[in-house]
Image (spheres, rainbow, N blue to C red):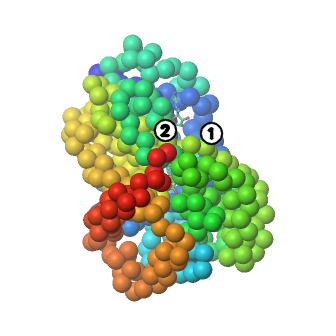
Amino acid sequence: MKIAIMGAGLSGLACAITLEKHKIPFTIFEKRSQVGDRFVNGEALISALTRPISDPIAYLSEKHGINLQVLSPMRHILFFSEKEQSVLSGQLGFINLRGRDSKSFENQLFKQVKTPIKFNSTHTYEQLLQDFTHIVLATGDAAYTSKIQDFQTDLTVTLKGATVEGRFDRHKVGIWLNYDVAPQGYAYLLPYSEQEACITLAYPDYPTNREFDLNKLWEKFYALACRDFKQPLPITDRFEVTRYIIGLCGQPRIGNTFFVGNCFGAVMPGFGFGQFESIMTGIYAAQDLCGLGHYSDLTQPLRESYKNSLVLRRTLELLDNSQLDRIVSLVHHSLTQKVLNHEKLNPLKLASRLLRPWVSIKQKTNPKKQEG
Ligand SMILES: Cc1cc2nc3c(=O)[nH]c(=O)nc-3n(C[C@H](O)[C@H](O)[C@H](O)COP(=O)(O)OP(=O)(O)OC[C@H]3O[C@@H](n4cnc5c(N)ncnc54)[C@H](O)[C@@H]3O)c2cc1C
């Protein structure tokens, strides 16, 4: 077996670490000149969305020997809708760094890989096929997947973000559910430290949303972030991502090619979380290569989560600001807090079961919004 991993991001590096643990040799290719050589941003892991695993960091360490340090545990999420505000508290998840910072998740994974990475790679998938028997496609987008097989694109997303300075509680995150600012999307503030945070605006590029001017929406969001965090938030760095694809591959493995991370479809359509899922696909591909299971079976629960999360996405885009106000006001409710914090409950699965019939009725009577 001659294995090539194409891409040294979360999924490719998780695959590399797992193969090394089982003493299986491989070659890993990375297009950039170093790991994580892109903008720095804050990302999050939300425990309620990774159930049945409530602590993904402990799970990766104890079950798979992959060790990651987060910036902070997330203890409070402040929800802001057009007219309501509420707080969810508990052991809600983690905040971590991505990109070219040495503390980013990809750089932490890189330090756990002993095999040298072939940087500045210009090898195409087709070229790698000539020299390797097995390929793990981990390029972080669906370009190759769509070329090779059916990839169901459910939406593409526009993201605009910035690093801001200010005074922050590092355990407190802000989420805005306000369609005047993020049409059918969301915006959030994730603190890096007590002095710095990342603010991000994300919304789907449905035809109805393409008429919006991103810069105007950004200005509105920025004003809200300053107002709701009660301070000016001077910007020190910016990033923008256009048409970020969210979808799912038809087959996780075709012949000897494994589709991992975003090549598999690891980003959950509800709120765009995909870090944990990407790492897991990398681990599962390696386990298959080590003879420890079948990649398609191992990734089946991730496909289920994706489908549940898609119900959540379709629900969100059928709502309007007054319904979002009602939802945000419910976050205060002790039952909501209990369900979201209860380790044995899977809120995503539960919500998808309850909402699926409503979504399908609504889509039949109002089929307009989702063609992207
Ligand atoms: C702005 C933004 C915010 C996000 N926020 C969150 C969040 O809060 N929580 C969360 O869980 N998820 C979040 N996500 C999603 C998460 O970042 C992704 O799911 C995850 O990074 C995907 O991992 P991956 O291994 O597929 O790709 P990556 O980690 O992106 O790695 C892909 C690697 O492949 C390399 N590569 C590309 N092409 C080639 C090639 N031809 N040859 C060799 N190498 C190549 C790239 O340079 C890169 O190093 C966010 C995504 C974005 C864009």
Q: Is residue 29 left or right of residue 218?
A: left
Q: Looking at mark 1, is its residue's CB closer than 8 Å to ligand 1?
A: yes
**Sequence order check, earlier mark of 2 and 1:** 1
SS under mark 1: loop
Q: Measured from the top left, where is residue 120 in percent x and y?
A: 59, 25
Q: Position of residue 124 (x, y in %)?
A: 49, 20
Q: Where 189 sits versus 305, above or below? A: below
Q: Residue at x 75, y 75 (%)?
A: 231
Residue ID at (45%, 71%): 92
Residue at the extreme bottom of the image, as rendered: 334
Dividing the picture into quadrants, the one containing residue 35 is: top right
Q: Quadrant of the N terminus?
A: top left
- Which residue occupies the foreground of this view, 117 or 356? 356
- The three-letter amino acid code for the residue at tag 2 is Gly
Residue named by callout 2: 140
Q: Nearer the viewer, residue 291 or 313?
A: 313
Q: Which residue is mark 1?
A: 37
Q: Secondary structure at mark 2?
A: loop
Q: Is residue 21 visible?
A: no
Left or right of residue 231: residue 242: left
Packing grade of label 1 (10 A; few <14, some 14-19, many >=20) is some
Disc 1 marks which amino acid? Asp
Ligand 1 lies under 8 Å from the Cβ of mark 2: yes
Q: Quadrant of residue 48?
A: bottom left
> Which residue lies most toward the top here?
130
